[in-house]
Image (cartoon, grey):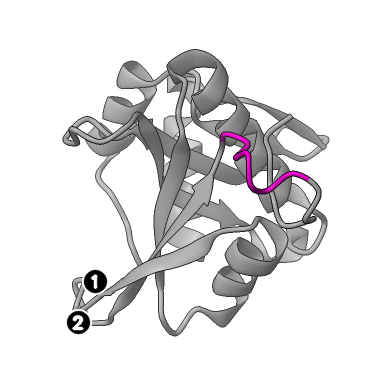
């Protein structure tokens, strides 16, 4: 397995992985927008043959007057490669890049209320917390959990075991 920063040559493979794994799909130009605007934030996981088996597509939030923060647009790992820690590694690399390159304070994402496996990954493995429920967020009318994870160590979290600091 190899995990590396995604590049423009990976975009069709990322799109194919997305189509295979997720109900939310994007046009190729949307992947291109991410690759050109935030070239250090998206990653791919490849098998030993160079086949993309997972990816994380991420960006910095541009529309906010809030503190700098990143957003996970999409995360997917092909079914036969799940439960190997790839999603966690992809997310940790992206979070680190957000902090190192953009001084991000936190990262956000949306997840379907019905997607228990992804919710468990985000909450229990990666330390995300629900910030709100967005009604009818998805095109099919399903609600989404809006979730956040702090990327900067807080003064109050030292020693409580709950802090998910990016190393």
Q: Nearer the viewer, residue 39 or 64?
A: 64
Residue at screen point 43% across, 32% down: 11
Is the C terminus in the top left, top right, bottom left or bottom right quadrant? top right
Residue 19 is situated, as x and y percent measured from the top left of the image, at 42, 58
Tell whether label 2 touches label 1 (CB within 8 Å): yes
What secondary structure is marked by label 1? Answer: loop
On screen, residue 155 above or below 123 = above
Q: Which residues are magenta?
A: 152-158
Residue 166 is situated, as x and y percent measured from the top left of the image, at 68, 34
Reading the image, the residue beneath label 1 is 138
In the rendered image, is residue 51 in sight?
A: no
Q: Nearer the viewer, residue 156 or 67?
A: 156
Q: Dominant secondary structure of the magenta stretch?
A: loop
Residue 1 is situated, as x and y percent measured from the top left of the image, at 82, 37
Give the side of residue 86 with respect to residue 112, left or right.
right
Membership of 80 in magenta stretch? no
Q: Residue furthest front?
A: 156
On screen, residue 16 above or below 132 = above
Residue at screen point 19% across, 36% down: 64
| Image quadrant assignment for residue 4 | top right
Residue at screen point 28% across, 79% down: 143
Give the side of residue 27 with respect to residue 148, left or right.
left
Give the crowd class for mark 2: few <14, some 14-19, many >=20 residues within 10 Å.
few
| Distance CA(mark 1)–CA(mark 2) | 5 Å
Residue 153 is situated, as x and y percent measured from the top left of the image, at 63, 36
Reading the image, the residue beneath label 2 is 141
């Amino acid at each position: 397995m190899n995990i590396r920063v995604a590049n423009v040559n990976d975009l069709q493979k990322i799109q194919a992985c997305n189509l295979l794994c997720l109900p939310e799909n994007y046009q190729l130009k949307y992947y291109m927008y991410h690759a050109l605007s935030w070239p250090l934030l998206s990653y791919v996981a490849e098998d030993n043959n160079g086949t993309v088996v997972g990816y994380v597509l991420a960006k910095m939030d541009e529309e906010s007057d809030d503190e700098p923060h990143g957003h996970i647009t999409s995360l997917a790992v092909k079914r036969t490669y799940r439960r190997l820690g790839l999603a966690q590694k992809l997310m940790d690399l992206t979070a680190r890049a957000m902090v190192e390159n953009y001084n991000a304070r936190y990262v956000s994402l949306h997840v379907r209320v019905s997607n228990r496996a992804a919710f468990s990954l985000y909450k229990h493995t990666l330390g995300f917390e629900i910030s709100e429920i967005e009604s009818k967020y998805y095109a099919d009318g399903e609600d989404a959990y809006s979730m956040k994870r702090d990327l900067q160590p807080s003064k109050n979290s030292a020693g409580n075991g709950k802090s998910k600091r990016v190393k």
